[in-house]
Image (cartoon, rainbow, N blue to C red):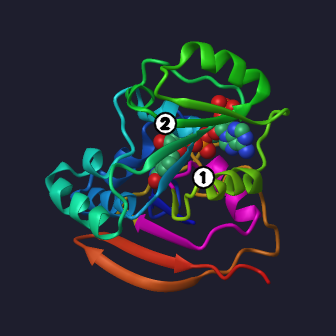
Amino acid sequence: MYANFVSSIDGIVALEGGTAPSGGIISGRNEADRFVMGMLRAFADVVLVGAGTVRAEGGRALWTPEYIFPAAADGFRALRHTLKRDGEPRLVIVSARGELDPSHRALQAGALVLTTETSAVRLRRVLPGVTDVRAVSGTDRLDVHQILDLLEADGHHRILTEGGPRLFGQIVANDDIDELFLTVSPVLAGQKGDRSFGLVHGVDFGRAPKHGRLIGVRRHGSHLFLRYRWERPT
Ligand SMILES: NC(=O)c1ccc[n+]([C@@H]2O[C@H](COP(=O)([O-])OP(=O)(O)OC[C@H]3O[C@@H](n4cnc5c(N)ncnc54)[C@H](OP(=O)(O)O)[C@@H]3O)[C@@H](O)[C@H]2O)c1
């Protein structure tokens, strides 16, 4: 399980209470960052995102390598072929309320939506047939372990999560993260109340922060590309 985010110098990844397409704004649509996003997608069986991220990115977004960095589409395809992962990584969306726009391009292209029993009934009626809807929970919140078990059972072993911060917070809280690819963009975003927030939102590790290990540092212009690893507790 690996994650990819772009943050401001002051640690902000989400703007306007999580309704803005924040990644592109924070990175300045930086070319190198988009290439890294594409490459990380190209390695994945699955791209896992929360519904908040899907809503914020707008109806035209896709979570494919080619969409984010078209210039390297041939290279991404060749990489996937070498990795014996033909086709695009599967987009998996987690949602309790099931508030997803059926006309969203990513849903029209085909995705997997993991949701509650109540939302599943409604979503199956309104979402395009190419999108699979599965009820994972009877309650409001899906258990992250259950999501990962389900993906594993479907044969998906290499999972990229692009957040957002609420979903990522639960993954980190469960000690389910192996690596984080973090781009630090040379901007200060500022913060007032809850309008902008950081990489992990909705959980607080208090005096027991989750210690990672820095295993890679690269720079492109003023953008910094960091790679961290976490050991899973035994
Ligand atoms: N800078 C970056 O790299 C980056 C990356 C990703 C996202 N973002 C930004 O982050 C903001 C969105 O933040 P966010 O924290 O709201 O995003 P999020 O984690 O993608 O979305 C939260 C939503 O996901 C669903 N969800 C999460 N965990 C769930 C669970 N265990 N069970 C059921 N549903 C679950 C819920 O959807 P329902 O409300 O439908 O129930 C919840 O409201 C946007 O501005 C986006 O652009 C930035």
Q: Is residue 61 shown left or right of residue 16?
A: left
Q: Which residue is rendered at x = 71% and y = 79% of the image?
A: 232
The location of residue 73, given as percent across then percent down, is 19, 54
Q: Quadrant of the C terminus?
A: bottom right
Q: What residue is shown with label 1?
A: 154
Q: Considering only vertical position in the picture, is 40 above or below 63?
A: below
Q: What residue is shown with label 2?
A: 111
The location of residue 229, given as percent across then percent down, is 56, 80
Kind of residue at badge 1: Asp
Q: Considering only vertical position in the picture, is 123 above or below 202?
A: above
The stretch in magenta equals 161-183
Q: Tell me, yes or no, if residue 14 can be seen here.
A: no
- Quadrant of the displayed image that contains ligand 1: top right
Q: Secondary structure at mark 1?
A: loop
State the residue in front, 53 or 48: 48
Say few, some or many: other residues with alpha carbon within 10 Å of mark 2 (under 14 / 14 to 19 / 20 or more): many
The location of residue 149, given as percent across then percent down, is 71, 57
Dot 1 beta carbon under 8 Å from ligand 1 = no
Residue 181 included in the magenta stretch of the image: yes
Quadrant of the image occupied by residue 196: top right
Mark pair 2, 1: CA separation: 14 Å
Kind of residue at badge 2: Ala
Q: Which residue is rendered at x = 39% and y = 44% of the image?
A: 63
Residue 150 included in the magenta stretch of the image: no
Q: Is residue 27 shown left or right of residue 52?
A: left
Q: Quadrant of the N terminus?
A: bottom right
Q: Which residue is rendered at x = 47% and y = 59% of the image?
A: 5
Which numbered mark, 2 or 1, is in the foreground of this view?
A: 1
Q: Considering only vertical position in the picture, is 158 above or below 136?
A: below
Q: Considering only vertical position in the picture, is 101 above or below 1?
A: above
The location of residue 231, given as percent across then percent down, is 66, 82
Q: Which residue is rendered at x = 56% and y = 31% of the image?
A: 132
